[in-house]
Image (cartoon, rainbow, N blue to C red):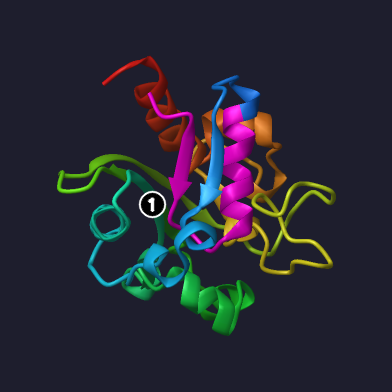
Amino acid sequence: MASQIVFATRNFAKLAQLRYVIERCDFGLTVVSAVSLFGDAGRYTEASSSAAEIAGNGAAAVADRVGCPILAEDTTFEVDALDGRPGVSAGVYLKEHGRRSILRALEGQQNRQAWITSAVAYAAPDAEPVIWSRRLSGRISMQECWLPGLPDWVAPSYDEPTGGGYNAIFTATGETRTLAEIPPDEALRLGYREPPFHAFLSWLVCGR
């Protein structure tokens, strides 16, 4: 079993989120960015129609290029009233327009259904990736809501206004809190990225 996970991401909050799951659940592993080890060879193009395809293709491409197993993760955000947008372009849309553009687009709209999907993929060189995914259904809140002081993979902060991605405007089905109001320990069960991270780690540690 590998003691170090090489994660193909440039997102430091996502790296910290995986480290939190590892430490909180006592998996005894370390994580390093593929870009920090291999430079541009640790990057991949996010071009496909689903989170699973992007993560799977990315993990496989980087693994083949650098010669070691690679972890990749992709998240999509779909709003029903916006015909599924921003979808696979969720990250770019957030950076360019922010969360409030979603709220403005839904002003007066009764249909506020939305979905967040996370896909985690792990691939060895010249092997098909193994993929774990979770699709979380919910609604777009009427306004941004978050708890101050939470990690930036959970919620915004003064230093990281896009922290937590769309968490501050998304309330999962069955919940009254937005995802940005749910502390990290509860997100191990209620979040969209933590459960597939945990499933991957269990698979890696407990055997294939």
> Splitting the image into 4 quarters, where does residue 140 fall?
bottom right
Judging depth in this view, the residue of 182 and 204 nearest the camera is 204
Disc 1 residue crowd, few under 14, some 14–19, many 20+, Cα 10 Å: many
> Splitting the image into 4 quarters, where does residue 123 fall?
top left
Let me know if residue 107 is in the magenta part: no
Rendered position, 13 above or below 97 = above
Residue 73 shows up from this direction:
yes
Q: Give the x, y percent position of residue 62.
A: 31, 59
User: Which quadrant of the figure contains the N terminus?
Assistant: top left
Residue bounds of the magenta highlight: 1-22
Q: Label 1: which residue?
A: 72
Judging depth in this view, the residue of 207 and 18 nearest the camera is 207
- Disc 1 element: strand
Residue 119 shows up from this direction:
no
Q: Give the x, y percent position of residue 170.
A: 56, 55
Answer left or right for 16 relative to 203.
Answer: right
Q: Give the x, y percent position of residue 78.
A: 38, 63
Q: Residue at x 16, y 44 (%)?
A: 127
Query: Of the residues shown, which amino acid type is indicated by label 1?
Result: Ala
> Splitting the image into 4 quarters, where does residue 200 fall?
top left
Q: Residue at x 77, y 46 (%)?
A: 150
Q: Residue at x 58, y 49 (%)?
A: 15
Q: Residue at x 45, y 62 (%)?
A: 38
Count of numbered marks: 1
Let me know if residue 18 is in the magenta part: yes
Q: Give the x, y percent position of residue 118.
A: 40, 49
User: Which quadrant of the figure contains the C terminus?
Assistant: top left
Which residue sits furthest top? 206
Judging depth in this view, the residue of 78 and 46 nearest the camera is 46
Rendered position, 9 above or below 19 = below
Answer left or right for 117 relative to 147.
Answer: left
